[in-house]
Every structure is written in C-alpha cells, then in structure tokens.
C-alpha cells in the first residue's frame, strides 16, 4: 500500500514540475472557463456581479407603477428584464433563466398616491422556495426602493404638499375611512400642510423627511412571496456556471494525458524496470498510477469549482451531487489514461494520440461548444463521448439541480466507460 | 549465489540466449564480457525476473526464481539505460525507490545520505537529475541499486559512456561492494575493465558461454603466446613465445639491442582466439 501511495505521490510531484503538464491541467482549463464565461455573459442572462436577474412585471400600468419599475430597473442589485407577462416571468423563473420576478399588482399606482391609508401598494415576488436567502434579499431590495420612492416625495415639500392635498381630497371622498376618524385626519393633514409650508419656506427638507419616515405604524407597501419551483433545465443564468464545468473537463483531460505520458515515460526512460524489480506486483504499479491520476483530476476539478464559487459566484445547486459527478468523471478519465498509456509506444505518440482522441471526444461531447448550440446529429453522436456524460453530470451538480437519482445514469455511463477502458488498458499495458 | 541453468530466450527470429548456464559464486565480482548483442542484458533481465526465459531455470541462493517478489528483493540492479526521474532530485529519486521496498522514513533518509556520499553526489543531492552529467547519472543509477542493501548486485555496463573520473569511482565502488561481502555481477564489453576488476569472467557471444574462469586461467589457457619485440638498428624482431622472460634473457645478451617490448596476452586475445573476431567490432 505504501508503495502504491509512493508511486501516486511521485507522479503528482512530476506532473506539478512539468510546466507544460501543469499548464494543460490547470491554467489552460481556467483560462477556457473564464474566457468563455466572459464571452457568454452577454447572451446567457445575468453574469457574475451584475445583479440578480429578475423580471419586473407591471400589472398596474399606471404612471406610478411604471416609475417604480424604472427605479428597480436602475437598481444596482438587480438586473431587470422588463416586458414579460406574469406567466412568462413565472416560466422564466421555473426554467431557471431568471432567479425571480417582481410583480406590481393592480392598484399599485393608486395606493402609491395615497400612502397613508387604504390598501398599501402590493408587490408579489415569485421566487424558488429553495432560495430562501434570495427571497428575503429581494424583498428587502424591493421594500427599500418603495420607501426610497416615498421619501423622495417627502424630500420635495412642494410635491409633498400637493400630495397631502390630494390625500385630503381622496379622504373626503373615500367612504371606507371610519367616520369617527375623519376629524383626526383633517387635523393631521392640516397640521402637515402648514408644517410643509414652513419647511418649504426654510428649505429644510431633511427634517420633514425624517419626521415623516418615522411617523411609524403605517405600511405603504405589502410584499408577498409566491413560490415558483424552478424546474432545473436549460442554461444557467451565470455564464460561468456553464463554462466552469467545461473547464473542469479540460482540466481532467489535461491530467489524464499528463499521467498517460508519465506512464509511457516510465517505459521509455527505463524507470519501469526499477518498479518491476522492486517487490511489487503489476497491480501495485497500475494502482499507484490510477490513484495518482484520480487524486490529481479530482483536485483540479475541486480547485476550479472553488475558484468558480469564490471569484465568479457560481453556486452549485448541490455540492454532494457535484462531488459525485467529479468522482465519477475522474474515475472515467483514469480509465482513459490507462488505455492511452497502454497503446502509446512513445511520449510523442501519447501526446499526439491523446490530444487527437480527446479533442474529438470533447468536440462531439459538448466540451468545446455547448451541445445546446450543436446540430442535431452531433447531439445524437454525443452519446458515445464520455465527455458528454461527464459534462452532464457536472452540470447536474452545478446548475441543473440533479438529484442523486438523476445522476445515476450519467455516473453509471462514466463508470462503465472508465472501467472498460481501465480493464483494457491494464491488460494491454506492456511492462517490457 | 546465483545459478543460471540452460537458459534459452528468443525474440522472434533472434536467439538472444542459447542454452546459457552460469554459476556466480558468493562474494566475488563476476564479469560477463561480450560484444554488443551477445545477450548480457538479456541474461541480467532473466536473472532478476524481468524477463521469463523460454526454458531453463534461475535460482538465487537456493530460494528459487526471482519471479517471486521476496526473492527479487535480494537483488539490486543498475540497468544499462540510466533509470531515473529527470525532474526529481537525486535525494527524491532515492527516497522514492526506497519506498518501493517499504523502508521506513528514517531508514530511507539515512540510507540515501550514506549512498549519496559514497557515490560523491552529496553536494548535488538536491539538484534535479536533469542537470546532471552522464557520469553523475551513472553514479546515481548505481546508488539506486543499493538502497535496500541487496546481497546480490547486478551492474549492466555501469561505465558505458562515462568520463575516466566517474569510471574509476564506479570500479572502486564495485570493489568495495565485494569487500562488504556482496556478490557483484558486472557486464561490460571493455575487456580491460573486466581484466582489472573481475575475480571471474565469463566470455559470452551470441547467447552462449564461450569460456569461464579467472582472468589468469582464461588468459593462460586461451590467450596464446606472448609477443616479445626486440628493437635493433637493423629493425624490429617479433617473437611469439610462451616464455617471454626466458626469451628476453636470451635476446638481451646479443649486441645492438636498443629496446624491447613485451605484449602479454589478454582477454581480447582470448576472445579473438575463441571467435576469430575482435571484441571491439
Ligand atoms: N526486447 C527485445 N526484442 C527483440 N530483440 C531483443 C530484445 N532484447 C534483446 N534483443 C536481442 O537479443 C540479442 C541480445 O541482446 P542483449 O540486449 O541481451 O545484448 P547485450 O549483450 O546486452 O548487448 P549490448 O552490449 O549492446 O548491451 C540482441 O540481438 C538483441 O537485438
Ligand atoms: Mg546490454
């Protein structure tokens, strides 16, 4: 066992010291992920750091609701898609194109014109129930903007006085206000009006704003949240969630190739003789290689996903599912590595053949251009490419929201291909 | 110590070993001398279990075949082609190979330090092998064969393509290994080397043992005559004789002798005698 580990550790060290190997197993994949992530950012919905992608749906269609929608559109926390119907927005949330939707319900404009009584402005949020943090954050953002809009009104005493008079008019006409309360409101509005008159004259708007905001008790906006369960499918909203799994694939390919080449080198450089002279079995040697390769591919994958999370805001839908995807993909690439090493006589042959085969598999498997953008026959052909299954599994954990059950198929295919390649490679690998 | 019995090995049409039998006694340096393609490396490979013979048997110390790992662990090999990792340092190379023998960490470190000192690489121990000279690589290649303290050491052309300084270091090393009580099997196609170093020599060609014995025995029985050359004013006279000392005594009495040269037969002559070819071809 110690010997198996020794071989694994030695190979990892060799790979790290080989600048080209390191480049292809780590930097190149990272570059791919970042570069295409930036390229796709425009097309694929919201990107990292540019706000939560939400729809704003205006069911009220008044000047006030349009103005509020405009405020949200300008908000830095949000990246707003406007012009959708309520159903359209709901669907967008469901397929994961948008994280949520803000619906301004009918009556919004009227409620905004008389903020002090009657029905408050009603806003409905459509958010996936699994995103509790998102829901409360969205609620906070919307509420704040609602209040900021109001305080702007207060901040302009002239506008506010107009508002107060309009409110008094409305109150007088409104039958819903209890008769006994009318004198109190009359009094209040008159006092407010004269106060604003003084403020207007002194230009001291801030005091009035503060006073009004702390008036307390009233609730000018009521935000309700409705759950819309996101059916995980389609493209992620963060383009990096799409490109980092691809980066992981490239990293795994680079690692598998690097390992295949070190294995061929054991033969061409004669060190295999020492391994064989030592009291080890052939199985020990192959196991050492396999363990080393597995550790390296897994580490590269984890490292890339950590970078994706920390620097590019890619939040996997399920970390355990993603871990399973990484493990199964690594296992598959270990098998591919073994087969490549077995059929390559020289390092150059290993590199040439390896890149040739892997690029082909990557091309038809969606590792270069997402399969969504590929013609139909490539999609069909892609089932033979382990890259496709690996990508599907990784995406399943990153943004497709796969359950372990849904992961079973791609993982089984990956382990099957990997196992078959490993068995064949181990059989074919010539030690002399 | 090591007994090879009736080994046969073919590679396709090429017969590499043709009924080769050898017994390497304990505690000696045993030279396997032969031209390119004679079957030296093939013999070593079979002796350590890297290759299976088509027929014949190998027995190490009465323990049986080196195809078994425990038997093999008693053998150290320095392959003809330097077998090291270029991107590891000398120390890392040795540490890795020692781990293959399940040596504990402290023992590995101690052993590596001792061997690095012994082959004169202590001051370069933490440099990558990539930057080593050919001679330095050879010395490290030899050190790597000794990590697990094997009683039998197989050195396959350990001085191929090295400078005189490294060559002397390697020959000294081989002697000291014998003096420690190890058995050394040493292949070479340099007959001077075999003559200087080896206690016993087997001359092989085309997979067969042509002769085997101590250097004196071989030269004495198979080397033929010595050649005495007498230089006089009239020219040189070449005399083949089995008794060069007596011949010199008689000739030096004659007048006009300006110089003499005596050529004793050597392993080269033995090989020439046995095959009709020169070893250097
Ligand atoms: N793996 C192999 N495949 C085919 N032929 C081989 C193989 N190994 C050795 N031979 C052949 O067997 C014969 C003996 O080779 P071997 O390497 O044992 O010679 P050697 O005495 O070590 O020569 P050298 O002094 O060049 O190292 C040669 O004719 C060689 O071509
Ligand atoms: Mg040889």
Image (cartoon, rainbow, N blue to C red):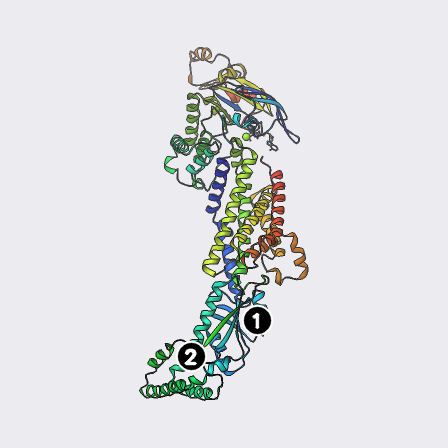
Mark 2 chain: A
On the image, the x and y values in percent for residue A365 come to 62, 55
Give the class, few, some or many, for how many residues have Cα within 10 Å of label 2's Cα (few <14, many ≥20).
some
Q: Which one is closest to the eye, mark 1 or mark 2?
A: 2
Give the class, few, some or many, for how many residues have Cα within 10 Å of label 1's Cα (few <14, many ≥20).
many
Vertical placement of A296 versus A43: above or below?
above
Q: Is residue A77 visible?
A: no
Residue highlighted by disc 2: A150
Q: Most extreme residue toward the front, as rendered?
A: A180
Nearer to us in this view, A33 or A234: A234
Vertical placement of B235 versus A341: above or below?
above
C-alpha span from label 1 to label 2: 27 Å
Q: Residue visible at 53% across and 14% down?
A: B221
**Discs 1, 2 touching: Cβ within 8 Å:** no
Quarter of the view holding residue A57:
bottom right
Mark 1 chain: A
Q: Secondary structure at mark 1?
A: helix
Quarter of the rendered image showing ligand 1: top right
On the image, the x and y values in percent for residue B107 come to 40, 31
Numbered badge on residue A89: 1
Q: Secondary structure at mark 2?
A: helix
On the image, the x and y values in percent for residue A77 come to 45, 69
Which comes before the other along the chain, label 1 or label 2?
1
Nearer to us in this view, A116 or A287: A116
Q: Residue visible at 53% across and 47% down?
A: A258
Quarter of the view holding residue B168:
top left
Quarter of the picture containing the C terminus of chain B is: top right
Nearer to us in this view, A113 or A94: A113
């Amino acid at each position: 066992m110690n010997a198996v580990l020794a071989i694994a550790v030695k190979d990892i060290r060799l790979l790290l010291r080989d600048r080209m190997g390191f480049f292809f197993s780590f930097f190149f994949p990272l570059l791919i992920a970042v570069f295409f992530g930036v390229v796709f950012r425009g097309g694929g919905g919201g990107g990292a750091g540019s706000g939560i992608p939400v729809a704003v749906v205006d069911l009220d269609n008044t000047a006030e609701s349009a103005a509020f929608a405009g405020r949200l559109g300008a908000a830095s926390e949000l990246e707003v898609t406007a012009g959708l119907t309520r159903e359209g927005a709901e669907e967008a949330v469901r397929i994961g194109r948008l994280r949520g939707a803000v619906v301004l319900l009918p009556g919004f404009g009227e409620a905004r014109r008389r903020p002090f009584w009657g029905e408050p402005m009603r806003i409905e949020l459509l958010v996936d129930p699994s995103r509790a943090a998102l829901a409360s954050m969205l609620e906070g953002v919307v509420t704040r903007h609602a209040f900021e809009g109001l305080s702007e009104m207060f901040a302009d005493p002239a506008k506010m006085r107009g508002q107060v008079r309009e409110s008094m008019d409305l109150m007088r006409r409104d039958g819903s206000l209890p008769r006994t309360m009318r004198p109190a409101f009359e009094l209040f509005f008159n006092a407010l009006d004269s106060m604003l008159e003084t403020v207007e004259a002194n230009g001291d708007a801030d005091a009035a704003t503060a006073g009004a905001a702390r008036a307390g008790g009233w609730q000018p906006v009521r935000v309700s949240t409705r759950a819309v369960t996101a059916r995980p499918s389609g493209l992620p909203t963060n383009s990096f969630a799409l490109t980092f799994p691809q980066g992981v694939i490239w990293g795994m390919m680079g690692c598998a190739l690097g390992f295949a080449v070190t294995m061929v080198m054991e033969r061409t450089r004669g060190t295999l003789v020492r391994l064989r002279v030592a009291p080890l079995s052939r199985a020990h040697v192959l196991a050492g290689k396999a363990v080393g390769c597995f550790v390296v591919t897994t580490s590269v994958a984890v490292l890339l996903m950590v970078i994706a999370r920390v620097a590019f805001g890619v939040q996997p839908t399920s970390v355990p599912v993603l871990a399973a995807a990484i493990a199964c993909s690594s296992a598959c690439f270990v098998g591919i590595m073994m087969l490549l090493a077995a059929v390559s006589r020289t390092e150059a042959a290993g590199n040439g053949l390896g890149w040739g085969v892997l690029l082909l598999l990557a091309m038809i498997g969606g590792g270069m251009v997402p399969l969504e953008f590929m013609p139909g026959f490539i999609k069909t052909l892609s089932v033979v490419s382990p890259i496709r299954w690996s990508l599907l599994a990784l995406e399943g954990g990153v943004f497709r929201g796969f359950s372990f059950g849904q992961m079973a198929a791609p993982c089984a295919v990956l382990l099957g291909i990997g196992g078959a390649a490993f068995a064949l490679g181990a059989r074919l690998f010539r030690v002399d | 110590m090591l007994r090879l019995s009736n080994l046969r090995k073919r590679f396709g049409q090429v017969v590499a070993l043709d009924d080769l039998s050898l017994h390497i006694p304990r505690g000696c340096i045993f030279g396997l001398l032969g031209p390119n393609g004679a079957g030296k490396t093939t013999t070593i490979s079979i002796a350590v279990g890297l290759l299976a013979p088509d027929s014949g048997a190998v027995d190490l110390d009465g323990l049986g075949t080196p195809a078994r790992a425990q038997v093999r662990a008693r053998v150290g090999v320095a392959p003809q082609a330097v077998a090291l990792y270029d991107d590891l340092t000398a120390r890392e190379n040795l540490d890795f190979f020692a781990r293959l023998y399940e040596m504990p960490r402290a023992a590995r470190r101690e052993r590596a330090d001792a061997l690095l000192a012994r082959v004169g690489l202590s001051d370069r121990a933490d440099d990558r092998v990539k930057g080593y000279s050919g001679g330095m690589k050879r010395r490290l290649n030899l050190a790597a064969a000794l990590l697990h303290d094997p009683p039998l050491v197989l050195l396959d052309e350990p001085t191929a393509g090295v400078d005189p300084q490294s060559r002397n270091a390697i020959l000294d090393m081989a002697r000291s290994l014998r003096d420690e009580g190890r058995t050394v099997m040493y292949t070479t196609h340099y007959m001077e080397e075999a003559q200087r170093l080896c206690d016993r020599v087997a001359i092989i060609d085309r997979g067969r043992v042509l002769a085997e014995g101590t250097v004196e025995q071989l030269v004495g029985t198979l080397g033929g005559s010595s050649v005495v050359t007498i230089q006089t004013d009239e020219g040189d006279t070449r005399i083949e004789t089995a008794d060069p000392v007596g011949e010199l005594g008689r000739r030096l009495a004659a007048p006009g002798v300006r110089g003499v040269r005596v050529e004793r037969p050597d392993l080269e002559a033995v090989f020439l005698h046995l095959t009709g070819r020169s070893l250097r071809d």
